[in-house]
Amino acid sequence: MDLKYTIRDLSLAGEGQRKIDWVKPRMQVLNSVRKQFEEQQPFKGKKVVICLHLEAKTAYLAQVIKAGGADVTVVASNPLSTQDDVVAALVQSGIGAHAWYNATDEEYNTHLQLALDTEPDFIIDDGGDLVSTLHTTRPELLQKVKGGAEETTTGVLRLHSMARDGVLKFPMIAVNDAQCKYLFDNRYGTGQSVWDGIMRTTNLVVAGKTAVIAGYGWCGKGVALRAKGLGARVIVCEVNPIKANEALMDGFEVMPMVEAAKHGDFFITVTGNTNIINKEHFVVMKPGAVMCNAGHFDVEVNVAQLKEIAVSERVARANIMEYVLADGRQLYVLAEGRLVNLAAGDGHPAEVMDMTFALQALSLEYVALNYETLSPEVYQVTTEIDERVAMIKLQSLGLSIDKLTKEQEAYLASWSTEE
Ligand SMILES: NC(=O)c1ccc[n+]([C@@H]2O[C@H](COP(=O)([O-])OP(=O)(O)OC[C@H]3O[C@@H](n4cnc5c(N)ncnc54)[C@H](O)[C@@H]3O)[C@@H](O)[C@H]2O)c1
């Protein structure tokens, strides 16, 4: 293969490889998938483009897909989450890459186009930018793409919209919706890594402060749970009355953002929606309030409106922008309102991404083996793959569980009250 790459600096590969080597032994499910792929070569002779946050765990996934026989090219799903050393290590291991940290919008789009120039057979996407770019700007490639898998809630929503409008041209597996994904990655992964991102960026105490969390979906639940564990008073803002009741019974306060805005020391948006914190909220916030986002796109904290009402702004510290309002109050936004755990951290822990990326690898294998019988729709991860990932995870931890007896199986399957 004629390896193509557009990266910052190939000489950073050594440090990138060390990061990959650190996560490898901690991703035992993916290791077992790798062994299977090496033997069975499900992607032999096929081209795969992976559009994900380009850090060490993703790098290892790319190497596992390559071990399955594919020509792999990676591209970033977010301009601030790319780690230049990791991308360099990938190129050195024979994987094409088009990405660098802090790419402008134009560079980000150019990188997507360069990755698509490889004419992929299969894709992995995160948030839907690759699929959307393919459909809107490269229709000539749509015939060649046999299918793929999508990583996150926002991307799955976009895929459903495309399928509903009849424009989706190949099958996509909604990896996000597998139980081994959202129950662990969205909840515990986001819960831990968001606070890691906030704490390493601000170096501030959480205990005794008030954390306002907008969105009580799978991610919001994890962020709230860990805020409580760190000693914060937690307020949840929701639009869904059922989720609001859930938050209440989980022990959190519930109120609209316009009220919560007066109380928060930390604000975390994780709704997947747009314009969650706006001008009417900024103007009532306490001095020193810190805002950040963990939803997929940088549209949840309305930074444009904050800039409009600020009399000055400056970089207060790496990844922290300070905005001073007319009355002298300072408000802070982390990582430009992009995913704080990835743009100002290393993302989810390796042991959590182990399950997510095993699902990705096995879902892509499923598409590679079955694409001829699949329609251009959004498919769920099969129960077999979901349960297989969970079982290998337990085994890798040295744990085993009970098994239904024949008698119990029959009991659960019966409906008659007679013997
Ligand atoms: N940071 C990460 O690493 C990471 C990981 C996984 C998912 N995500 C992203 O996080 C976002 C949320 O994912 P999820 O799986 O929790 O989704 P989800 O659908 O389970 O939850 C989203 C919640 O936000 C609520 N919501 C919507 N609009 C709102 C508003 N205006 N105010 C308050 N609440 C509102 C919804 O009612 C819902 O309960 C998505 O964009 C997803 O792609 C990020």
Image: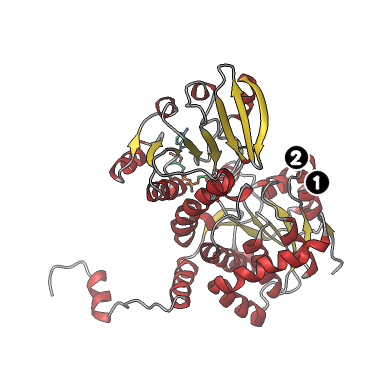
Looking at the image, residue 300 lies above or below residue 199: above
Disc assigned to residue 61 = none
Alpha carbon separation for disc pair 2 and 1: 9 Å
For badge 2, the amino acid type reads: Asp
- At horizontal 63% and vertical 64% (from top left) the residue drawn is 371
- Work out whether residue 47 can be spotted: no
Looking at the image, residue 243 lies above or below residue 351: above
- Work out whether residue 49 can be spotted: yes
Crowd around label 1: few <14 · some 14–19 · many ≥20 (10 Å): some
Disc assigned to residue 110 = 1
- At horizontal 49% and vertical 59% (from top left) the residue drawn is 181
Q: Say which of 288 and 168 sits in front.
A: 288
For badge 1, the amino acid type reads: Thr
Disc assigned to residue 105 = 2
Task: Please identify the residue farthest to the bottom as the structure is shown.
Answer: 39
The image quarter containing residue 98 is bottom right
